[in-house]
Amino acid sequence: MSRTRVHNFAISLDGFGSGEPQSFEAPFGHAGERLHEWMFATRFWDADGGSVGVDHAFAVRHGDGFGAEIMGANKFGPPGWQDDDDWKGWWGPNPPFHTPTFVLTHRPRPSIEMEGGTTFHFLDASPAEALEVARAAADGQDVRLGGGASVIRDFVAAGLVDQLHLVQVPIVLGRGTRVWDGLEALEQDYDIEAVSSPSGVTHLTLTRKVSAQS
Amino acid sequence: MSRTRVHNFAISLDGFGSGEPQSFEAPFGHAGERLHEWMFATRFWDADGGSVGVDHAFAVRHGDGFGAEIMGANKFGPPGWQDDDDWKGWWGPNPPFHTPTFVLTHRPRPSIEMEGGTTFHFLDASPAEALEVARAAADGQDVRLGGGASVIRDFVAAGLVDQLHLVQVPIVLGRGTRVWDGLEALEQDYDIEAVSSPSGVTHLTLTRKVSAQS
C-alpha cells in the first residue's frame, strides 16, 4: 500500500519550519542554514566525513521507497519565481528527488524534465487531488510530502499523511511559518515518539494510528 | 551565589504551558492533567510506586536548594481569585513550597502563613523588583520561578533566569499560553540540552551561558 510520508522536516523549538523573509539569497529567511546543520553533518549528506548515528539513520529514510514527491510553491523557489520563465528550482540540473515531483501553485506551467529522473509538474489542486495524481505517478511506491510547513499542515489536517519525521532543532526563531498551527489534538490520530540525539536535535516521529486511517 | 531556576515546567509540542479557558474546575483549561502525567508517574510524586528513572531525576530538582518561590497570579488561583478573601491557593493547608512564596498580582493583599513553612506574600512589582525581594528572603539559597508561561517569558526576557527545565509532552494543544513567544534567539544566551525519556516526554534544559550573565 502506498503511504504518504514526511522526512527530515526541521523545525525550531517554537515550531517554525522556516524563518522570514524568504528570498533568493535566504531560502529559509533569518533561520539561515541553522535548521539543517544536523543533516549536513551526517553521512547521508557528506559521503566522506558524515556521522552514521541516529541522525543519519533517520536522514537516509528520505530516499527510501518513494515514487513521487509533492511540495509547496515556497519550497520550489523564492517569492515571485512564477514570474521567471527560466526558474527550475534550487537544486541545479540533477535535483535530489529522482521521481515525478509535483509543485503546488496557483499558476501552473509546463512540466520540466531534469536529469536523474526528476520531472517537475505544476498543479493547481487541493491536497486530496494532488495526492491522487502523485500516487498514480508513484506506481505503488510511497509519496514524499516535502513541505514547507503550511503544506504539511494542510495535508495533515486533511487526514492524508501516514508518517511524519520532524527534527526539532534547539533554536528559537520567533517568527516564520509554524508547523503545528491548526493541528490541535494531533496526538489522537498519531502515535508520537521522541528521540534526542547527541547532536542536540530531537527526532519526532508521528505514525498514524490504525484507528485514524481512512 | 543565588540562582533563579525554573523546574518541571511542562509544555505541549506547540509550546503551550497551559490550555484554556482556565477555571476553578480546570486549572489548566482543556489541557487537563495531560501536561503532568509524566510527573505523577515518578517517585517524586508517588512515593510508593513511582519510577526512579530520568523523569524522577529531573523532577526531584524541584525541591533542591530553594529559599523562595515567585509565581504569577494565574498559578495561585483561577481567574477572579482576587475577589475571594478566603482563597489560599490550590494546595490545601500545607503547600509544596515550604518557603516564602511571592505571588505577583496587581491587587496585593496581606500575607498568609500556611503550614510547613510556606508563607504567601503578594507583590505588585516588576520582574527585577520581585526577584530582589525574593532573593533577600531566600537568604543565599536559590529562587524558584514557578510559572505560568507568561511569567517565565517575562523573567527570561528581562535576563533574570539562570536555568530552565522544560518538559515537552507529546500533545498538541493548539491554544493557551505559549512559553516561547518573544524569546527569539534564546539559544544565543543559553546552552540547550534535550533528553528524551522512555515515558514519551523530552526534557529540555536551558543553562545560561557565562557570557550572557549580568
Image (cartoon, coloured by chain):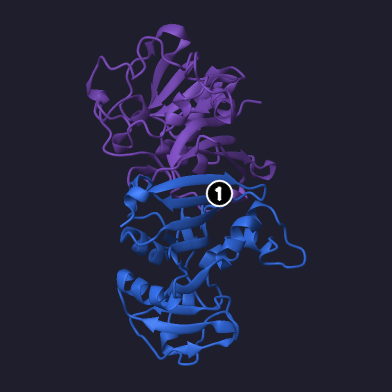
Chain colours: A purple, B blue
- Residue B38 occupies quadrant: bottom right
Q: Position of residue B16 (x, y in %)?
A: 47, 58
Q: Position of residue A101 (x, y in %)?
A: 45, 20
A177 shown above or below B7:
above
Residue lying farthest to the right in this orientation = B48
Q: Position of residue B183 (x, y in %)?
A: 34, 53
Q: In the drawing, does residue B46 fall left or right of residue B133?
A: right
- Residue A113 occupies quadrant: top left
Residue lying farthest to the top in this orientation = A115
Q: Name the element at disc 1.
A: helix
Q: What residue sits 59% from the left and 35% below the top?
A: A162
Q: What residue sits 36% from the left and 30% below the top?
A: A33
- Give the number of marks: 1
B82 shown above or below B154:
below
Give the quadrant of the C terminus of chain B. Answer: bottom left
Q: What residue sits 61% from the left and 51% below the top?
A: A188
Q: What residue sits 46% from the left and 46% below the top?
A: B192
Q: In the drawing, does residue A210 fall left or right of residue A160?
A: right
Q: Nearer the viewer, residue B66 or A21?
A: B66
Q: Chain of mark 1?
A: A
B123 shown above or below B109:
above
Residue B13 in view here: no
Q: Nearer the viewer, residue A153 or A140?
A: A153
Residue B12 in view here: yes
Q: Amino acid at mark 1?
A: Leu
Q: Position of residue B107 (x, y in %)?
A: 35, 85
A19 shown above or below A134:
below
Give the quadrant of the N terminus of chain B. Answer: bottom left
Q: Nearer the viewer, residue B164 or A57?
A: B164
**Circle 1 residue:** A186
